[in-house]
Amino acid sequence: MSQSNKPSLILSAAALCLLAGCSSINFDVFSSDPVELGDSNTALASLPQPTSEPYVLRGEIQQIADYIALVPCDTDNPIALYLDENTKQTFTGEPSEPVYAELSGYMTEANSGQQSRYAFAVTGVNVRSNNLKQCRIDTMKLTAAGHEPYWYARVSDDYLVLRHSESFDRREKIDLSAIADRQQSYQTQDYSLSVNKASCKDSVSNAKFGWTATLVLGDEEFSGCAAMPNNDIDSEWVGRYQGEIEENKDTLTTEMTLYPDHRVVTRYIRKYQPATEETGIWQAMKDGKVKVIVMKSRAAPFDSKRVFRREGDLLVADTEELNGQPLPLAGGGLQLRLVNQSLINL
């Protein structure tokens, strides 16, 4: 976003950064260029241990020469990807076709020498498809499907719903379930579903998934693929937060919305000026805080990172990093109060 509508303390920080040599930054929209892959296994191994749990980012894969990036749904800013060699092969070979992907992983600092300060370290592939319309579909539950004959199953609360080519939808209460990092199983009175973390290709759509599925119905066993939920609707952080400060006889309103798909949109509103906004990614930290990252673009010519802690219904950030330089936020920090946690109205 334009820095002119941020608090004056951020303006001062930007000025200091420019004086320190930040004016040499490439302000092109691709200034957060995808990371060159090289030896991807080495790149992943050299990353610091994650401070957040993996989550799903989804959007369009873009490949430019040796670079691979993800453009999240509802944004136009590419995010650099760190991929191991096996995952890299999932997205190469068809550079002319649009590719939709759901990737699990976490945002991390890019290796020194890279143009982008932040990258998304991919720990797994949930879905890979040529159907970009899947950006419009939120999958809240575990789903699985197969062919010859066709079958479809989904976990819905305490029930396992099954659609089979020879019957109507069946819905039975789950009697027994087991959930681990690489395997899940669900048992009802008449059928069971088990999924395992492994590469799987749908025989009809050619879509690729990160999980295999096995359905047992009576004496018959059916194979297919499975996908995990792509939205974290139960996150305690999801919601809209707002705060105001008085500045030079004017009021600056900061409105930050954390969406279930881990997008974050921050709007800056002044009384007599058009509102401006910046988009980025948020991730929950293992220490009970939430990190908001905005990567460089024409709208936001600086990498920025804020770490918020929760104080009642407030999110409070004491500092902001601009291009890696930590800077204090005056006046007790940036304080944003929860004003809406309804997913319908976000």
Image (cartoon, rainbow, N blue to C red):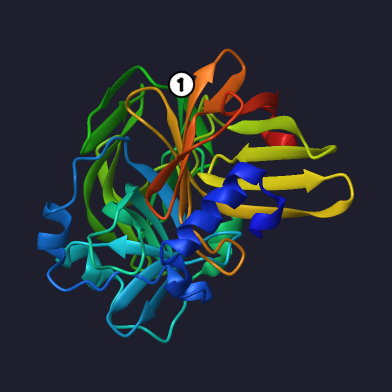
Residue type of the residue flagged with mark 1? Asp
Residue at (51, 77) in percent of width and height? 28
- In the image: residue 51, left or right of residue 339: left
Considering depth in this image, is 243 or 24 the residue closer to the camera?
24
Relative to 11, residue 253 above or below: above
Quarter residue 284 falls in: top left
Image position, residue 197 (x, y; %): 22, 46
> In this orientation, does residue 130 appear?
no
Image position, residue 99 (x, y; %): 43, 72
Considering depth in this image, is 97 or 35 the residue closer to the camera?
35
Residue at (51, 73) in percent of width and height? 27
Quarter residue 336 falls in: top right
Secondary structure beneath dot 1 equals loop
- In the image: residue 218, left or right of residue 238: left
- In the rendered view of the protein, which quadrant contains the N terminus? bottom right
What residue does disc 1 label? 158
Considering depth in this image, is 112 or 249 the residue closer to the camera?
249
